Image (cartoon, rainbow, N blue to C red):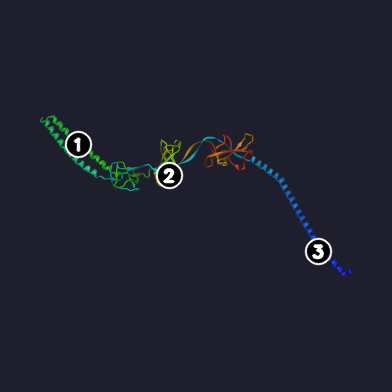
Amino acid sequence: MNTNTGPDDNNASSSGLHSEQASSLPPYQNIKSQSQINSGKFSLLALCASSFLLLIGLILFSGDKTATAFADEQSLVIQNAKVNVQSLSIQPTYIKQRKVYGLIESAKQANLGFELSGVIDETRVVEGERVVKGQILATLDKQRLFARKKELDATLVRAKADATLASLSAKRTAELVDKRLEPEQRLDEANANLDAANALVNEVKARRGGLDVELQKSSLVAPFSGQVVQQLLDLGTVVTTGQAVFSLMAEMDLEARIGLPTRTPLALNLGQGYELSYAGETLPAILISIAKQRDRATRAVDALFKIDAQTAQKRYLMAGDLVSLSVDVEIEKQGAWIPISALSNGVRGLWTLFIIDKSSGSQIIQPRSVYVEYMEQERAFVSGAIAQGELLVVSGLHRLTPNQVVQNLQVTNTASN
């Protein structure tokens, strides 16, 4: 057995060794490169964390001083700025304006009926028609009255004849008495008969006059000029005395009836002019009447305002139109008038005011909760935790906070009492 190796064998062995070394070298180098990469990432993260912590520290330390300086400067500015205030004036009552409403109605309106009973024989007008004073609106059947008239005419003729005969008899009796052919008693009887005959004539004439009145009353006449609002009964209806047939209303004589609230009538003067409101326009009127009793249902007092006829015609007013009147009503409530600019929103339906409190020696802003009782234009009446003479901040509320100290106060009079 040959144990010697030749050159080729050595070369093969040598090349095999180098091949194994070459094949084992790359994994080692790869492991080393991965460790270096991880080490670099860790260093970078550490650097970033250190920088971030340093930045936060710088912000905290520098920001605190800046915020403190800004707060001190802002506080100083607010303390030195002018704060407009006004002194509160507490009142036991306040006056508020209230609108009261009423209706236009005709000054003359009547339900017309006959003074006699009978059957409606004729109607000469219809609903909506305009009539003048004295115009005949309807008539009753007059046949019965005409029959009575003929009867009375005949009775009057007979009475006049009897009176004529009695007169002649009395004259002749007087001549005979003068000749002493008849006793004086006969003359007295003749004169008495003459008086009775004349009385009967006068009686028939009176009855005839009464019948003429009934004939006139059988015609329903308009008592004033106006418009027929409603026809209540038709032709042929049997009516009783006073039963309404037509409803008549005067057109141009218009009035406004307005119910006034408590105590308001005491402030109004009869004969004085007032301005009513109708369809967004003013309507001049004169107060002509104030009732002396209250309405049991509304507890209001009715007042009548006369409206000029030309104005009513120009504004196309008619009965039933709605008008209003602005009146002042006194309300018993303790509080004060303040400008609306002094109010800020509160909670639970309340509003907040800022009051200057000097009890601690400094001028400190304190909030107060109040109720708004009434508002008009640029002022409001409030009640609540306020006292006479307290200083109220009236403007610039957005720059102020509770318990803030202010120094420069300027007293104003922005709200009138």
Q: Nearer the viewer, mark 1 or mark 3?
A: 3
Callout 1 amino acid: Leu
Q: Which mark is residue 316?
A: none
Quick one: label 1, few (<14), some, or many (20+) residues within 10 Å?
Answer: some
Q: Nearer the viewer, mark 2 or mark 3?
A: 3
Quick one: label 3, few (<14), some, or many (20+) residues within 10 Å?
Answer: few
Callout 3 amino acid: Ser
Q: Earlier in the sequence, mark 1 or mark 3?
A: 3
**Where does label 2 land, which residue?**
322
Instruction: Tell me the SS state at disc 3.
Output: helix
**Where does label 3 land, which residue?**
23
CB under 8 Å between discs 1 and 3: no
Q: Is residue 87 left or right of residue 120?
A: right
Q: Earlier in the sequence, mark 2 or mark 3?
A: 3
Callout 2 amino acid: Leu
Picture residue at 18% right of the left edge, 34% below the top? 196
**Where does label 1 land, which residue?**
200
x, y percent for residue 31: 78, 58
Q: Quadrant of residue 205?
A: top left
Picture residue at 49% right of the left edge, 40% below the top? 97
* Cα gap from disc 1 to disc 3, whole angstroms: 174 Å
Q: Is residue 363 above or below residue 6?
A: above
x, y percent for residue 209: 24, 40
Q: Quadrant of residue 7?
A: bottom right
Q: Is residue 366 left or right of residue 249?
A: right
x, y percent for residue 12: 85, 68
